[in-house]
Amino acid sequence: MNKINLTEKFGLFEEHWTPKIIGELNGQQVKLAKVKGEFIWHNHEGEDELFYIMKGTLKMEFRDKTVVLNEGEMIIVPKGVDHRPIAKEEVWILLFEPKNTKHTGEVESELTVKNLDWI
């Protein structure tokens, strides 16, 4: 049982759209990600995803609307819902999702990360 300093963990990596695992609990992984630019449209057929904005502003596009998230805000994307995160400037995100969640769902692209690193 060690405390985790999120700011220190964010300082350990620079790459965008490449989540890093910082913990696990009850079949869920806690991840950090830095994002900038547009991600791809995707969904997670069997898993919900929680996005908590640590730093910056994130636009979460859905097929029927866009939700703007600021620091200290979060959104839960239900399983099976198409979504696409967009960040004009770098955004720091804390993610909670089941351990078996694929980074880009069933969509394969140059942004797909198959093996996430622990930091």
Image (cartoon, rainbow, N blue to C red):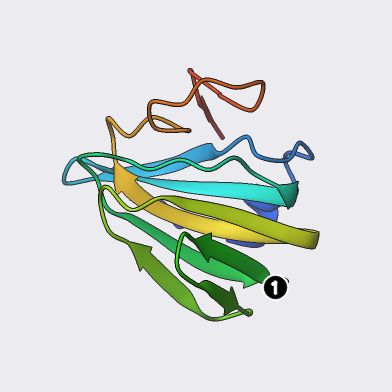
Which is more toward the observer, 19 or 105?
105
Above or below, 52 relative to 78: below
Above or below, 67 relative to 107: below
According to the picture, the residue beneath numbered tag 1 turns out to be 57
Instruction: Give percent across and percent down for residue 87.
Output: 73, 60
Q: Secondary structure at mark 1?
A: loop
Residue shown at 73% from the left, 71% from the top: 56
Residue shown at 47% from the left, 33% from the top: 104
Q: Of the residues shown, which amino acid type is indicated by label 1?
A: Thr
Does residue 68 appear anywhere in the picture?
Answer: yes
90 sits left or right of 53 in the view: right
Instruction: Give percent across and percent down for residue 13.
Output: 74, 38
Does residue 4 appear anywhere in the picture?
Answer: no
Residue shown at 63% from the left, 68% from the top: 59
Which is more toward the observer, 98 or 6?
98
Above or below, 118 relative to 32: above
Q: Quadrant of the C terminus?
A: top right
Q: Residues within 10 Å of mark 1 (few under 14, many from 20)?
A: many
Using the rendered view, name the quadrant where residue 69 is placed.
bottom right
Instruction: Give percent across and percent down for residue 55.
Output: 69, 70
82 sits left or right of 38 in the view: left
